[in-house]
C-alpha cells in the first residue's frame, strides 16, 4: 500500500502538469491531492482512504475517476458539494482556484462523499468520449474514394465519435490562419483544429455512405436518461465549457442518428482479449463495403498498452474480403517522440488485396485541438491519388 501511495502521488502530479495552462481548475485540484499524498503514508487519514479505495485500479485512472465522481455530484447539484461547486464554471461557478480556500473545500467535499466515491473509484470505467476525436476517421476516409464504408470504434464508450460525420470540423492553417478544409454536416462550426506543417486536402469533401456504425467497449454507456448523460459529462473537466458544449452537441447528434436507418450499435467486449471474437461475430459478416476501424486514446487503459491489438487486427484483416483501414490516435510507446507532452500519433494501417501498408500521418493533441502534419500525410494523399482503390 505504501508503494501505491507513492505511485498515486506521482500520477496526480503528472495530471497537474498535463492540465497546467489548459484547465487551471483541474491542474490546481490535481496538485492539491498530489501535495496531500506527498506528505507520505499514514500522515493524512483522507489520503489513506484514497489509497484503500484505489487498490486494484490503474493509477492512471484514479485521478480522473476521483474528480469525475465529484463533478458528477456537482452536476447533480448535490448539496454537500455546493461550496466546491462555486469553483466549477460547468454549474455557473465563478470563483478562481486562487480565491478562497479551495483545498479546504475539496477536502470537505471528498470527506462528505467518501462512501459514494469509494464505490465509484472501485467500479466506474473512465469514459473518454472526447468528441473532437471523430476527426481520426472522418478525414482519412475522404481520400480512398470508397462509395460506402462500415465504421467501427474500438473503445467506443457512448459511441459519440461514431457520428463524427454529423458534426462540423474546421481545419485551420496555423501559419496563415486560413481555413484549410471543412468537414461534416453539423450546425455551424463545432470544432476548430489548428494544424502546422504541409496539409494536402483530399479532393473529396463528402464522406462515404455509412452502412453501419458499430462500437465495442468494456462497459458501453447507453445514453437512455439524463443521469446517463450527466455521468458522461462528469468526465469533462469542470472549467472546460467549450468541451462540455461539444459533448452535449455530440449527444444530440447521437440521438438524431439513432432515429435514422443506420443507428449506432454498441457491444460489450473486454479488449484486447475479446477483440478477435468481436471481429468475427460482429464485423466479419460486413462484406459489402470496406471496414474502417478506429481507436482514440484507448491503449493507455489496456493491460498490455495495446500491444496485442495489432496481431489480432492484422490476422483478421488479411482474411477479410473487403479492404480494412485501421486509424489510431494513440501514444506511440516506441519510436519517435511527440512534439508536446501527452501528444499522440495519428497512424493509418491498410490491408488490401493481401498487402499491408502503414503511415504515420500526423501528431495530434489528445483533445484534437492541434495537429502537426507529417510527410506521411502527403504520401497518404499520393497513394490514393494514384488510383489505389
Image: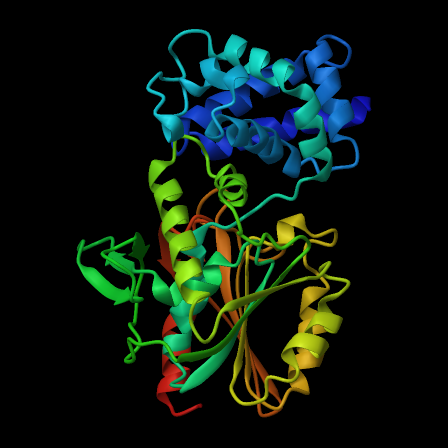
Residue at x 53%, y 40% (from the top left corner):
227
Q: Pinpoint residue 92: horizontal percent, then vertical percent.
A: 34, 25
Q: How is the image coloured?
A: rainbow
Q: Pinpoint residue 228: horizontal percent, then vertical percent.
A: 54, 44
Residue at x 48%, y 41% (from the top left corner):
233
Nearer to us in this view, 31 or 269: 269
Where the C terminus falls, by quadrant? Answer: bottom left
Q: Pinpoint residue 150: horizontal percent, then vertical percent.
A: 51, 78
- Report if residue 375 is visible in the image: no
Nearer to us in this view, 251 or 237: 251
In screen coordinates, is 229 left or right of 200?
right
Task: Determine which quarter of the picture holds residue 53.
Answer: top right
In screen coordinates, is 335 left or right of 372?
right
Nearer to us in this view, 360 or 78: 78
Question: Where is 229 relative to 118, above or below?
Answer: below
Q: How many marks?
A: 0
In screen coordinates, is 73 left or right of 115?
left
Q: Pinpoint residue 340: horizontal percent, then vertical percent.
A: 45, 44
In screen coordinates, is 329 left or right of 6?
left
Residue at x 66%, y 85% (from the top left corner):
318
- Report if residue 25 is visible in the image: yes
Residue at x 74%, y 37% (from the top left corner):
57
Question: Where is 127 relative to 265, above or below?
Answer: above
Task: Determine which quarter of the picture holds residue 195.
Answer: bottom left
Where the N terminus falls, by quadrant? Answer: top right
Amino acid at each position: 500500500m505504501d508503494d501505491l501511495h507513492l505511485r498515486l502521488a506521482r500520477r496526480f502530479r503528472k495530471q497537474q502538469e498535463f492540465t497546467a495552462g489548459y484547465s487551471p481548475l483541474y491542474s490546481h485540484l490535481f496538485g492539491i491531492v498530489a501535495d496531500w499524498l506527498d506528505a507520505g503514508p499514514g500522515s493524512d487519514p483522507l489520503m489513506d482512504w484514497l489509497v484503500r479505495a484505489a487498490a486494484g485500479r490503474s493509477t492512471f485512472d484514479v485521478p480522473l475517476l476521483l474528480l469525475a465522481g465529484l463533478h458528477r455530484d456537482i452536476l447533480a447539484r448535490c448539496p454537500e458539494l455546493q461550496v466546491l461547486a462555486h469553483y466549477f464554471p460547468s454549474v455557473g461557478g465563478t470563483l478562481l482556484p486562487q480565491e478562497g480556500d479551495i483545498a479546504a473545500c475539496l477536502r470537505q467535499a471528498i470527506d462528505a462523499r467518501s462512501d459514494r466515491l469509494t464505490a465509484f473509484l472501485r467500479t466506474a470505467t473512465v469514459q473518454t468520449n472526447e468528441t473532437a476525436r471523430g476527426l481520426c476517421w472522418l478525414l482519412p476516409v475522404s481520400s480512398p474514394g470508397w462509395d460506402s464504408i462500415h465504421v467501427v470504434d474500438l473503445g467506443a464508450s457512448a459511441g459519440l465519435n461514431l457520428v463524427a460525420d454529423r458534426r462540423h470540423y474546421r481545419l485551420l492553417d496555423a501559419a496563415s490562419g486560413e481555413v484549410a478544409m471543412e468537414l461534416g454536416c453539423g450546425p455551424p462550426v463545432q470544432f476548430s483544429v489548428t494544424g502546422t506543417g504541409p496539409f494536402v486536402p483530399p479532393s473529396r469533401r463528402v464522406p462515404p455512405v455509412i452502412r453501419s456504425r458499430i462500437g465495442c467497449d468494456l462497459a458501453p454507456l447507453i445514453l437512455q436518461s439524463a443521469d446517463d448523460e450527466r455521468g458522461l459529462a462528469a468526465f469533462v473537466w469542470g472549467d472546460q465549457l467549450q468541451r462540455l458544449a461539444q459533448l452535449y452537441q455530440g449527444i444530440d447528434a447521437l440521438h438524431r442518428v439513432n432515429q435514422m436507418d443506420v443507428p449506432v450499435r454498441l457491444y460489450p467486449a473486454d479488449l484486447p482479449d475479446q477483440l478477435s471474437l468481436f471481429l468475427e461475430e460482429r464485423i466479419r459478416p460486413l462484406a459489402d463495403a470496406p471496414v474502417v476501424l478506429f481507436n482514440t486514446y484507448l491503449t493507455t487503459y489496456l493491460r498490455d498498452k495495446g500491444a496485442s491489438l495489432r496481431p489480432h487486427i492484422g490476422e483478421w484483416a488479411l482474411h477479410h474480403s473487403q479492404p480494412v483501414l485501421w486509424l489510431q490516435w494513440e501514444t506511440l510507446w516506441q519510436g519517435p517522440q511527440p512534439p508536446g507532452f501527452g501528444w499522440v500519433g495519428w497512424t493509418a494501417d491498410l490491408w488490401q488485396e493481401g498487402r499491408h501498408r502503414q503511415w504515420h500521418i500526423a501528431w495530434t493533441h489528445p483533445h484534437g485541438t492541434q495537429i502537426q502534419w507529417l510527410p506521411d500525410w502527403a504520401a497518404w494523399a499520393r497513394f490514393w491519388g494514384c488510383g489505389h482503390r
